[in-house]
Image (cartoon, rainbow, N blue to C red):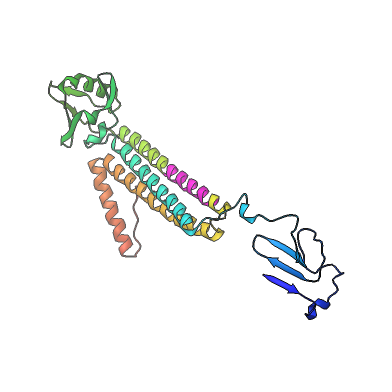
Amino acid sequence: MTIALSPATPAYQRQLTHKPFFCFLGKFRTSGNVVSLSASANYVSLRVGASRLQPPVKHAWGKRRGIVRCATIEEIEAEKSLIEKDVKERMEKTVETVRSNFNSIRTGRASPAMLDKIEVDYYGTPISLKSIAQISTPDASSILVQPYDKSSLKSIEKAIVNSDVGMTPNNDGEVIRLAVPQLTSDRRKELSKIVSKQAEEGKVAIRNIRRDALKAYEKLEKEKKLSEDNVKDLSSDLQKVTDEYMKKIDTVFKQKEKERLSSSEKTLLLEMEYYNAAAAAFPCPMLILSI
């Protein structure tokens, strides 16, 4: 941009003895008949007459330091997706851990999962039993352990005896058989407490995962990557996911509770479910049964 004033222009009648009405960062000397102003994004100069005068400081905008770059929408969405993915993966692992712990608890019915936590001293190295033997259930009250290496039979038998599965192994030199005893009333009550405790631990882990995700959202808000309304919406969606996985733990818990019941208790439970379903389907003064 260039502005030139000469004696031929009316604007030249302005008294040059007064201070210029332009504002610059610096002081300038004036002389001559023609005043011109040149400006660009990086350079400002004032020319008086034929001489060219420059301000004492030239603004080097191209050499900025400490530049702050705002995150793009794609980067923000990527961070949100990463948090959501991490939440679901951790919650899914928590449910699987609860299910695995439940399977290792002995109930009245035989299951290969009862031996999942047993480790065998195999040539000086602790190895999971299921990795060195085939485990099956020929019937509902027995477990069959067939090692891939028959020389490990003694080590497997010792590991089962030292474990807390509560079963005595029968080693015939080829395979090991385990008879699953029926649960006593006291043992059923004890197992019920253990199962309830493990289910609650799983729910606590789910809540902790939710807490970590909320902290991550709050951090994005402080960094001005998310607005307060965004955080509220994401927190609402996060609560729905949390409730979903809480229900999954409740489902696994109820399934395990049914396994520990005796035949008569299972029959009673089925009758209760029948009457409760009828009461819900037909609104009338009926007694809602519960354990």
Residue 263 in percent (x, y) is at 22, 42
One can see residue 196 in this view? yes
One can see residue 142 in this view? no
Residue 67 in percent (x, y) is at 60, 52
User: In the picture provided, is 234 more to the left or to the right than 279?
Assistant: right
The residue lying at 35 percent from left, 62 percent from top is 285
The residue lying at 29 percent from left, 56 percent from top is 275
Judge by depth and name the residue closer to the eye, 164 or 107.
164
Q: Quadrant of residue 178?
A: top left
Prevailing secondary structure class for the magenta stretch in the rendered image: helix
Judge by depth and name the residue closer to the eye, 88 or 246.
88
The residue lying at 28 percent from left, 38 percent from top is 103
Residue 163 in percent (x, y) is at 29, 25
In the rendered image, the vertical position of residue 268 relative to residue 184, given as above or below:
below
Judge by depth and name the residue closer to the eye, 254 or 229.
229
Judge by depth and name the residue closer to the eye, 67 or 144.
67
Q: Residue furthest right?
A: 17
In the rendered image, the vertical position of residue 97 relative to residue 13, given as above or below:
above
The magenta stretch spans which residues? 203-218
Q: Quadrant of residue 39?
A: bottom right
Q: Quadrant of residue 187?
A: top left
User: In the picture provided, is 251 more to the left or to the right than 168?
Assistant: right
